[in-house]
Amino acid sequence: MTTLQRGEDALLRRVKAFDWPRLKLCFAATALCMLLAHGFAWFNLFPSHDGTILFFDADVVMLQLGRWVQLPYYRFLRGKISMPWLTGMFSVLWTALSVYLVSDLLKLRRKATMAFAAVLGTAISITLLNATYNDKSDPFTCAMFLAFLGVYAVRCCRRPWLGVAFCGGCLCLSMGLYQGYIEFAIGLFLLCLLRDCLTRDLPWADYLRRGFTSVAALLLGGVLYAVSMKAVLAYKHLELIDSYNGLQQMGRSGPAVWLSRLPGAYKQVFTTLLGYDVWNNRGMRLATALCLLLALACLVLALRCKPRRVLAQTAILLVLLPLGLNVVFLLSEQAPTLLMLYPVYLVYALVLLLTETDTAPRSAAWLACVLCAFLTLENVIYANGAYTYRKLVYENTRGQVYTIMAKVQDLPGYVEGETPVVFSGDFTDSNFTYHNDLLRQYEEGDTGLSGSAITYDGTIKWWFANIMGSGARVVNTQAELDAWAENPAVQAMPSYPASGCIAMVDGAAVVKLSD
């Protein structure tokens, strides 16, 4: 009984010592900003691209991509049906907890915490998740939270070995959801060490010890992930898929290739923040540039009276930070997408951290928050425009498919469920797509948005089975579609929507979309 009483007392002390006001602030700020930006996507259903899956049945593909934790996540936590409102609420939960962990570790004040919550919750990566991969938005944000939680354990646990072990488990689960978000852990480790350098005069021994502890936690997480992934693949008798977003490509490069990619990794971080894209207009680029200049000025003030040792330690961390936030660039054969670049938004946590140092003027912190508020407003405007566009694209695709299938069913000899239906050509590069010059901007840049909700062969299957609930026997493998495209009779057909673009060819109902 004495032992139980001591355990209960210790638990109560921990609960009372918990920073509840900070947690409430993080939830309030995150929920409000995310609702403003993504509320349209949470209250409407407009599945597109990978989002057309609706009911998660891609177990094999996720295992072959190494994302084995998604299977228990969908099965035991969120459910396999993609429900926009529930997906959004889970996204708010994981993002708010992530903001809390970052805010607590970096000791950000109230206004800085709200500014970081606003920027992180309205980032372009979250918008693209809701617009194109809406069934993945909550597991991806959960991967971010688990990465931050691992760092929190290392930094706050009194027993270093226990913190490293817990962090390894968190990073294993994080990479099992989405491998690229280990960059969140790397970035936060570097930011925490940078704060230590600025607030304490760390001896080299302590500096190296904390750095090696962080590296040990990251390596342990990587090892646990590799072992667990191989065990799951062996149990399921599967192998990793060789694709642009798969893990097989990592084995085809080595140290020499990684070194050659270093300049590109640094460049992409700055082009993401300061380069032009449809979601990053001139005002946003100017605001980000001012944030970086403001942070640099505050850093100079903070280091002005510091010993050279601190200058060297800070320089090392600042050199490593862009690389840590984009380490995927070194390992992948293709440039990371905007989803993989989500960790780059930790740069704004760096700005808020530096503007709140003791040597920085009070106006610097306010100016940084104002700039973050402007970026948030622009993110909200872009997100709502993108969702409106995706809704129009979905409605257009839905109407066109129903019209086409009505004509297919009128073809002589067509039998529903028995006659193969072939869509020859490219959905996204044909007259099938939604055309609106006023909204054309949302198709430009690196966002990956297109004028058709159906994009590749897998989405054909999901659209007819999950969206329409159709029993049509639709050809949905790229090899078969390529073979039909080479058929002379199909090549002679006019493209949609010309007369004769829908016809029976060799026992199949063929719809020619484009050449």
Image (tube, rainbow, N blue to C red):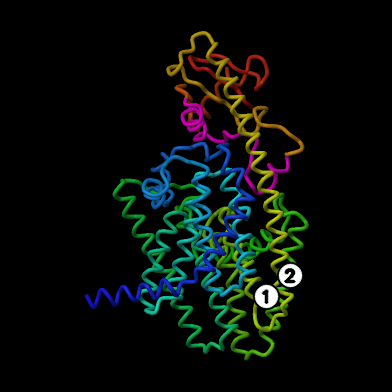
Left or right of 447, for residue 459:
left
Left or right of 77, for residue 196:
right
How many C-alpha atoms fall within 10 Å of the one at disc 2: few (<14), some, or many (≥20)?
some
How many C-alpha atoms fall within 10 Å of the one at disc 1: few (<14), some, or many (≥20)?
many
Asked where in the image residue 456 lies, by quadrant, the reply is top right
Considering the numbered disc 1 on the image, is that residue within a helix, a strand or a loop?
A: loop
Q: Position of residue 222 (x, y in %)?
A: 41, 64
Point 65% across, 35% down: residue: 451
Task: Indicate the amino acid at tag 1.
Answer: Thr
Q: Residue furthest top?
A: 412
Q: Is residue 220 magenta?
A: no
Q: Quadrant of the C terminus?
A: top right
Q: Quadrant of the N terminus?
A: bottom left
Q: Position of residue 93 (x, y in %)?
A: 50, 56
* In front of the other: 105 or 335: 105
Q: Is residue 458 magenta?
A: yes
* In front of the other: 62 or 374: 374
Q: Which mark is residue 207?
A: none
Between the residue at mark 1 and the residue at mark 2, the CA separation in whole angstroms equals 9 Å
Q: Position of residue 175 (x, y in %)?
A: 44, 58
- Magenta stretch? 440-469
The answer to whether the residue labelled 1 contacts the one labelled 2, judged by CB atoms less than 8 Å apart, is yes
Point 67% across, 45% down: residue: 384
Q: Earlier in the sequence, mark 1 or mark 2?
A: 1
Considering the numbered disc 2 on the image, is that residue within a helix, a strand or a loop?
A: helix
**Residue under pointer 2:** 367
Q: Position of residue 388 (x, y in %)?
A: 66, 39
Task: Indicate the amino acid at tag 2.
Answer: Leu
Point 69% across, 63% down: residue: 372
Q: Is residue 249 above or below residue 108?
A: above
Q: Which mark is residue 355?
A: 1
